[in-house]
Amino acid sequence: MIVVALWFIALLAALGSELLPVTLSPDHSRRVLQCALLLNIALTLFGLVRHRRLVAESRNYRSLEARVQTLASRDPLTGLPNRRTLAELASSTRITAAQRGLSIAVLTINLDNFRAVNEGRGHAAGDAVLVEFGEALTQLMPPSATVARLSGDEFACLMTYDAAYSSTVDTVVGHILARLTRPFAFGRESIHITASIGIARTEPSDVTVDPAMRRADIALSAVKKSGGASACWFNAGMGRELAARNAVEAGLRTAIPAGRIVPYYEQQIDLATGRLMGFEVLARWDHPTDGILMPGLFIPIAEDAGLISDLSMSIMRQAFEHAAGWDAALSLSVNISPAQLKDPWLAEKILKLLIETSFPPQRLEIEITETSLFDNMALAQSIVASLKNQGVRVALDDFGTGYSSLAHLRALPFDRIKIDKSFVMAMNDDPESTAIVEAITRLGHSLSVPVTAEGVESAAIADRLRGLGCHRAQGWHYGQPVDVQQTRRLLADRSLLGTARAA
């Protein structure tokens, strides 16, 4: 604006005396005109510079806009289309398939145990595997197919094929699995990894590809459940199974806070004296329409859905409140899920429950399975130490089904070993099971660790265990697990209800 104002003043001066009351000398007029000319040149140069800046800013904006569009549509690590772009490409693929009378096969692919690569080799190694696997998928799929990275270690592929020749898809899947038999390279290291693949096809009733994607995900879950490292097509049975599972999960989310998952109590007997020593706490679902549901139906789903901690804490709270007034010599044994053993605050949560329910820590025995120790031994040691410092006892459960490692018995100061019921129940018919029970019992004796046998269903097995020197037993020979009302009646009959006898 200043430049324009000066230029306007100079122009007025150049017009002479017709506009100005003062008469200018010729030299003065010439200087004014020179100034006006210079201002014109400056204004022109200013305009050119401003124009070039605007052009550069526009070019940078278009470049930035293109970059933003690329980031919005592509996975930044592998360069493959992302989930959003896959949905857009799926629409065009569907149109093309309809025009040519073809079906669309949807593959959802998940790398097995990929977390172990990131944790064991570092994220750089994990990223290298993802990039190389993405390149391999692109090369192995037909040229017209779409390959995308959905998230983390999950990929998806869309390919058109003739529905009469589904073997075409199976061949491609076979090539993908075959590629995974070769290791991925990261520097001088070789990284071996497998993948699970779920496959589904679009149906005539599908308006979009989304329903086929969901069916492929269901098939992928089935592969994962069966151990991974393979592929399978979706079938209707999988859909029904998923619907049933989702119904159980939805029910659990209501039942746990409502206290519908209740403790049942299984007797633990001293084999030498026949005396009742305590109970193992087991979970049952008191379902409003289906009656009492066994844990095998809902515990695995609770673990998958991340509900197992809430379920376990609810069961423990109820059991502690029930048993707080029972005979002081009676103990409670509670199983801890492997998922819970990954919680660094587990010991604090259990001790908090004991305080709130006034249940003595010395009457609680926490049972940990051997296989749950593999993920993080250091954390398990910390949790066990915290519990034992407060007087809680810890048992190694299902011993014999895992590695039965002496290293675990040395690493953690267990107060008890529990023999898995599968060996105990087979003692009368299987010499190998009998030998395993004898070996575990002798091991307990040599380490001065008491041994409890689960699954005792007959007097004959109880006698054999007693002869081996096994300390405690539990199983249907002593009665099936029962609810709190039946347990109280049992204790009342034995004068073990409401006493204060010391342990």
Image (cartoon, rainbow, N blue to C red):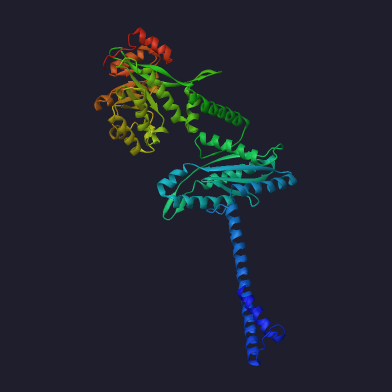
Quarter holding the N terminus is: bottom right
Question: 88 above or below 469?
Answer: below
Task: Locate residue 108, reporting x and y percent.
Answer: 58, 42
Residue at the extreme front of the image, as rendered: 21
Task: Locate residue 187, reporting x and y percent.
Answer: 43, 56
Q: Nearer the viewer, residue 207 or 330?
A: 330
Q: Quadrant of residue 487?
A: top left
Task: Locate residue 327, reporting x and y percent.
Answer: 31, 14
* Residue at 61% from the left image edge and 55% from the top image edge: 69
Q: Quadrant of residue 449?
A: top left
Quarter holding the C terminus is: top left
* Residue at 52% from the left image edge and 26% from the top image edge: 254
Q: Nearer the viewer, residue 174 or 57?
A: 57
Q: Nearer the viewer, residue 440 or 376?
A: 376
Task: Locate residue 406, reporting x and y percent.
Answer: 30, 33
Residue at the extreme right of the image, as rendered: 99
Q: Nearer the viewer, residue 90 or 24?
A: 24
Question: 108 above or below 280?
Answer: below
Q: Can residue 141 be seen?
A: no
Q: Can residue 25 be seen?
A: yes
Q: Quadrant of residue 213?
A: top right
Relative side of 158 to 224, left or right = right
Q: Count all numbered tags in the image, as a single digit.
A: 0
* Residue at 62% from the left image edge and 88% from the top image edge: 31
* Residue at 47% from the left image edge and 27% from the top image edge: 299
